[in-house]
Image (cartoon, rainbow, N blue to C red):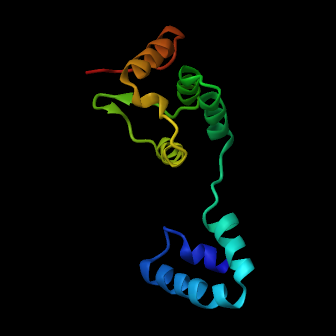
Amino acid sequence: HFLELRMDQHAQVEIRTYATLIGSEIVRRWCPIAWEAFLDYRLHSVNWSRLEQEIIKALAAGKREEAGKLALEFGLLSYGTDGLKPNRERSEIEAKLKQLNLPIPWSDTSLLTELMEILAAKGGKKWLLE
């Protein structure tokens, strides 16, 4: 846990460099099997939220439109005057989808337009496109 926190991409560069050195030069040599397990199950693992799992399930089933609808329902897609508004959760799932070479459903502008129309038809939030 000590190394994981300090090797995280959000850690200060100097701390991250020091922790990486400790891990790769000391722990790797001292406990090689534990080091490999740490790399596989802690450092390079991916955690999925429930929302992300639902979107992944839809994509894996070939239901791109359903995945887009789920993203809309989960509040990941907000449209403003300049297009999609920034959203941290959406950015995180997009990065995970790219890691798996899966399509990002809302990157298709025709699908995105359709999703916004669906929301408006259901009496959802009014989307201003000025």
Relative side of 82 to 29, left or right? left
Judge whether residue 18 can be spotted in this image: yes
Q: Quadrant of the C terminus?
A: top left
Identity of the residue furthest to the left in this view: 130
Residue 56 sits in which quadrant? Answer: top right
The correct choice, above or below, for 107 with respect to 15 in the image is above
Judge whether residue 78 can be spotted in this image: no
Q: Who is closer to the viewer here, 70 or 99? A: 99
Residue 104 at x, y = what percent? 47, 34
Say which residue appears at 60% left-offset and 84% top-offset.
23
The correct choice, above or below, for 92 with respect to 74 in the image is below
Say which residue appears at 58% left-offset and 31% top-offset.
74
Say which residue appears at 46% left-offset and 45% top-offset.
91
Residue 66 at x, y = what percent? 58, 21
Residue 61 at x, y = what percent? 65, 26
Identity of the residue furthest to the top in this view: 121
Residue 31 at x, y = what percent? 72, 86
Q: Who is closer to the viewer here, 11 or 25? A: 25
Say which residue appears at 62% left-offset and 67% top-offset.
43
Q: Quadrant of the N terminus?
A: bottom right
